[in-house]
């Protein structure tokens, strides 16, 4: 029984190493200087929707094409500053596309009830065996 609980705890802690993604955010349009989806602005406009230390950031066009496959120049694209595409930095006087971003947070995200309770699961396993 002790060993079983230990195993269950191991499994549940390893869940926390996985990524849980936030929703997609699109707060800006490229019509001005560029498309600015920076963490600072996103946090201000979406309180508590983004974890304090995101592990990854993903940017895509509104239609869902990965930003990296578009081939535009991005001023920033990281988990500290966020994402920005500046119109004046693009080739052939092209404008930035409209991008959306999301962040990979340590699970569980959004915070709340853990995906399952270790105690409940241990009890379930005991009944089964
Ligand atoms: Ca945008």
Image (cartoon, rainbow, N blue to C red):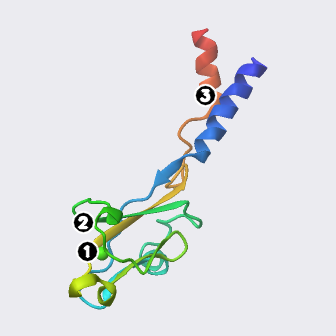
| Residue beneath the point at 21% across and 62% down | 63
| x and y, in percent, of residue 91 in the image | 27, 83
Element on which disc 1 rests: loop
Q: Which mark is residue 120?
A: 3
CB under 8 Å between discs 3 and 2? no
- Quadrant location of residue 2? top right
Q: Residue at x 31, y 74 (%)?
A: 72
Counting from the top left corner in percent of width and height, residue 11 is at 63, 32
Q: Nearer the viewer, residue 108 or 92?
A: 92
Please state if 16 lies on the left or on the right of 30 as rendered.
right
| Residue at the spot of label 1 | 98
State yes or no: discs 2 and 1 in contact (Cβ < 8 Å).
Answer: yes
Provide residue 7's location: percent of width, then percent of height. 69, 26
Bin the neighbour count of mark 3 within 10 Å (Cα to Cα): few under 14, some 14-19, many 20 and up: few
Crowd rating for badge 1 (residues with CA inside 10 Å; few <14, some 14–19, many 20+): many
Asked if the beta carbon under badge 3 is closer than 8 A to the nearest atom of ligand 1, the reply is no
Residue toward you, 23 or 62: 62
Mark 2 within 8 Å of ligand 1, using the beta carbon? yes
| Quarter the C terminus occupies | top right
Q: CA distance from mark 3 to mark 1?
A: 45 Å
Residue 62 numbered mark, or none:
2
* Helix, strand or loop under label 2: loop
Q: Is mark 1 within 8 Å of ligand 1?
A: yes
Residue 40 seen in the current view:
yes
Whether 14 is drawn above or below 89: the answer is above
Residue depicted at x 50% and y 67%: 48
In the displayed structure, 44 sits above or below 123; it is below
Residue 75 occupies quadrant = bottom left
Q: Is residue 94 left or right of residue 67?
A: left
The alpha-carbon separation of the residues under discs 2 and 1 comes to: 6 Å
Mark with earlier residue (3, 2): 2
Residue 84 x, y percent position in the rendering: 39, 79
């Amino acid at each position: 029984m002790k060993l079983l609980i230990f195993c269950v705890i191991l499994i549940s802690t390893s869940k926390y190493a996985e990524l849980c993604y936030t929703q997609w955010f699109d707060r800006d349009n490229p019509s001005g200087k560029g498309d600015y989806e920076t963490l600072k602005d996103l946090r201000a406009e979406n309180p508590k929707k983004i974890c304090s230390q995101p592990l990854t950031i993903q940017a895509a066009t509104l239609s869902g094409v990965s930003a990296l496959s578009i081939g535009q120049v991005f001023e920033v694209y990281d988990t500290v500053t966020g994402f920005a595409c500046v119109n004046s930095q693009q080739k052939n006087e092209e404008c930035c596309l409209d991008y959306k971003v999301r962040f990979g947070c340590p699970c569980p995200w959004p915070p709340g009830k853990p995906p399952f309770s270790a105690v409940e699961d241990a009890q379930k396993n005991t009944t089964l065996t």
